[in-house]
Every structure is written in C-alpha cells, then in structure tokens.
Amino acid sequence: MILTLLKREIRLINRKRSELLNPIVFFILVTVLFPFGVSPEPALLQQIAPGVIWVCALLSVLLSLDSLYRDDFDDGSLVQLLMAGVAPGLIVLAKSMCNWLFTAIPLIIVSPLIGIMLNLSDSAFWAMVVSLLLGTPSVCLIAAIGMSLTVGLRKGGILLALLVLPLYVPILIFGAMAVNAATMGQSYSGQLLFLAAILVFTVSMAPWAAGAALKISVSE
Amino acid sequence: MNWSWFFKLGSPKWFYQMAGRWQPWIWALTFIGLATGCVWGLAIAPADYYQGDLQRIMYIHVPAAYLSMFVYVVMAVAGAIGIIWRMKMAYYVSMSCSPIGAAFTFLALVTGSLWGKPTWGTYWVFDARLTSELILLFLYLGHMALFNAIEDRKNADRAAAVLAIVGIVNIPIIHFSVEWWNSLHQPASLSKLEKPSIDQSMLWPLLIMIVSFKLLFVSLLFPYVRNHTLWREKDSQWVQQEVEQ
C-alpha cells in the first residue's frame, strides 16, 4: 500500500519538476544573504555557519510542504484516498518520505557547497552531512503534522510556521551542536545519537498524529 | 462505582450551573490562600542567606512556572478526553485553558528574568530550561491561533486538541532540562519522593502559594469555560433562557 502511495507521489512530483528547484534556490539565497547582513569576515562566518545552514534547511523544508498537500486537498484526491479506506497515517508517511527524498536530500547535497562558501571548517563537513541526514527526516515528519492541521485553511502559511517552528527547536539544538562540536575538534557522536533518538520517536509517533489531523482537516 | 458524576460533567448546562454556584466559594478560598501565602512569603519567612530579599520572587516564580506546565497537561488531557469520548465539554475546558496557561507561562518568564538580572547578571540566556519554557509559550499561542483560524468550530476543537497532545512532549523536556543539561537555572528544590532541599520556614509559604495558584487557575478557568459554553451553545434553549434572565 505504501509503495503505491509512494509511486503516486513520485509521479506527481515528476509532473511539476520546476517546483523541486524552489526550496534549493531558496536555501542557497538565504544562506548567501547572511554574509551581507552580518559580516563577510571568514572567522565570524565560520562560527555562525552551522546555525545558518541548519536554520535555512528547516525553513526550506517548511516552505516546500505546501505543494505536497495543497494540490491534493484542492482537487479532492485526499478525500478520495481517505474514503477508499487508506489509513491516514500511511498517506502522511508516504508524503513525508517523498518530501524528504525530493527536498531534504537535494538540500543535503547542496549543503557542502554552502559550507565552503561560509568557510565551514573541513573537520565539520561530515558532522554537517550526517546530522542533516539524521535530522531532516524528523523535520519532514513534524512539518507533516503542522501541514495536516492547516491544510484546510486558505491562509495557513504563517500559522504553519507558528505551530511547527517551536517543535523544531530540539532538532536544531542538537544538529547545530554536533556541527559546532566538530568545528572545535570534539567528539560529536552524542549529539548524533540524540538526533537518531528523536528520529525514532518521530517516525513512530508523528504519522499517527498527522493522520488524525489530516482526517479532521479533510472532514470539513 | 457510580459514574453519573462523570457523565454530568459532559453536560454544558449542568457544568455551567455547577460552576456558577461554586465560583464565589473558590474565589474566596483563592483570595484567602493568596493573601496568607503572600504575607507569609513576602514578610514573615526569613530572607535568603545569599540573595537577601531578592529570593522572595520565588514565591511567585515557582508557582507560576509549575502552573504553566500543569495547565498544559490539563489542556492536553482534556483535549484527549474530547477526542476519545467525544465530549464537547472537554473541548471547552481544553480551549479555555490556553489563555490562562499562556498567562502563567508569561508570568514565570517575566519573574524569572527579573530574578535573573541581579543574580545571574543577565535577563535572559538561551539555556535549556528557559528556552523550553519559551517554547511552551509559543505552543499556547499556536493552540489559540489554530483554534481561531479554523472556521468550523467542531473541527477547530479537534485540531487544537491534536496540537495540544503533540505539544505535550515538551513538558518532560522542561521538567528534566535542569537535570539533563548543565543549566544556569538551579535544579528543582521540591520533589514528591525526596526530602525537599529547602528549609521548612520557606517551604510552607511556598506550598501555600502553589496550592493557591492552583485554586486561582480553577477560579479563572470557571468563568472562561462558562463564557465559552454560552458562546458555543448560543443556539440552545437553556442559554437563551439564561440570557433573557
């Protein structure tokens, strides 16, 4: 069942490939704004790079979510899927996996480039990639809860941010901490394990919550 | 076991009238408790050896912080009861909790930062306890914003309840943050199982303040729930009779 849903999502994404680029362009643009806004001095950039990359990744994922749910909600296919007896948790899981594969993975691929531009130290490179790999699935799943709650609203965008951003804080803390620790040459496996623990927790709980929320939103 | 009291709680009319009858008594108890606690804590209890009179902020700060979490749990549990047993009264209680909880959270943050400036030398640091309490404030605000954004009231009830349940993961994080991380904030002085690490002369006024803050929560909750009930049940007959009187 989940495979069918995944195939459907991938096919839908393939039909509007141009939208895939938007989060990545957004990610690059916002990170590039920081040297202008703060200071182009390499030493300072090196310090803020982990936080900047993490925050921008969170925001890019949040912005990418709308197209994944809105179209399905507007053309009624979400209602049809639910009426056909598909478990709402599965729909959310499939959408989150797609979101991760087609938004988060490209971001992670681009992130070393941003790291070089922001003068991130070489020792932090792997910490950044691995922490993003472990952290972004949770980000997608938590965002799915917020999106399921607000999909029925016409102006859900800013509300989505208000609902979801507070829940991102633990992921952001551990993600940025891991990269910071690596920059200073310390061991960062503890932070990565925390990210993994959060991932296990969100994978097991978030689809249920988001599924329940989706059902409520669709029943309008 | 007679469960009729539980089912009575589900009736808006019964709850409205019960809350109306009890309200003055609970307010009276709250005022007695708050007055006793304030006088005892602010005037009679000894000043702290290191911090002097500054430490008396504790008699407001600790109950407010405790209530900020307690109210959230009440809100989430009421929301869960609403979803599971489809009791609309539980939704009304859940929705009425969030402005009160947000106020307690705000109070805890303000008194905490006023206390932090002279003792830590700063109004605010981004450490675990403070940050998670700030997140709690945003969760309350999000809860209210989500409820107000959805036009269909029944869906708004359920969506807000789901959000409240999701946000409850933050409560243990706040509670244990001072133990898990090296925080500027001191660890808990009160515990259910261990002997409190606070002297008797300060413990009693603090406990009185905590109990009175809980009473204050109930006395604030009742008018909120009653108003909410009137608003939501405005089409029913008993509300129209009530308003005419």
Image: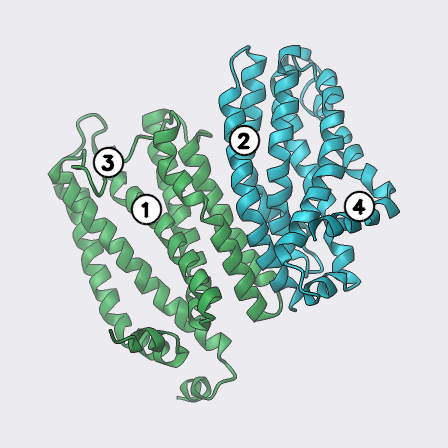
Q: Are marks 3 and 1 on the same chain?
A: yes
Earlier residue among tags 2 and 4: 4
The answer to whether residue A154 is above or below residue B58 is below
Q: Are marks 1 and 4 on the same chain?
A: no
Chain hosting mark 2: A
Real-space CA distance between mark 4 and mark 3, rounded to the nearest whole angstrom: 54 Å
Determine which residue is flagged by label 3.
Answer: B189
Chain hosting mark 3: B
For mark 1, give the secondary structure. helix
Determine which residue is flagged by label 4.
Answer: A10
Chain hosting mark 1: B
Quadrant of the image containing the N terminus of chain B: bottom left
Real-space CA distance between mark 1 and mark 4, rounded to the nearest whole angstrom: 47 Å
What colour denotes chain B? Answer: green
Q: Is residue A140 left or right of residue B187?
A: right
Disc marking residue B128? none
Q: Amino acid at mark 1?
A: Tyr
Front: mark 4 or 3: 4
Q: Quadrant of residue A152?
A: bottom right
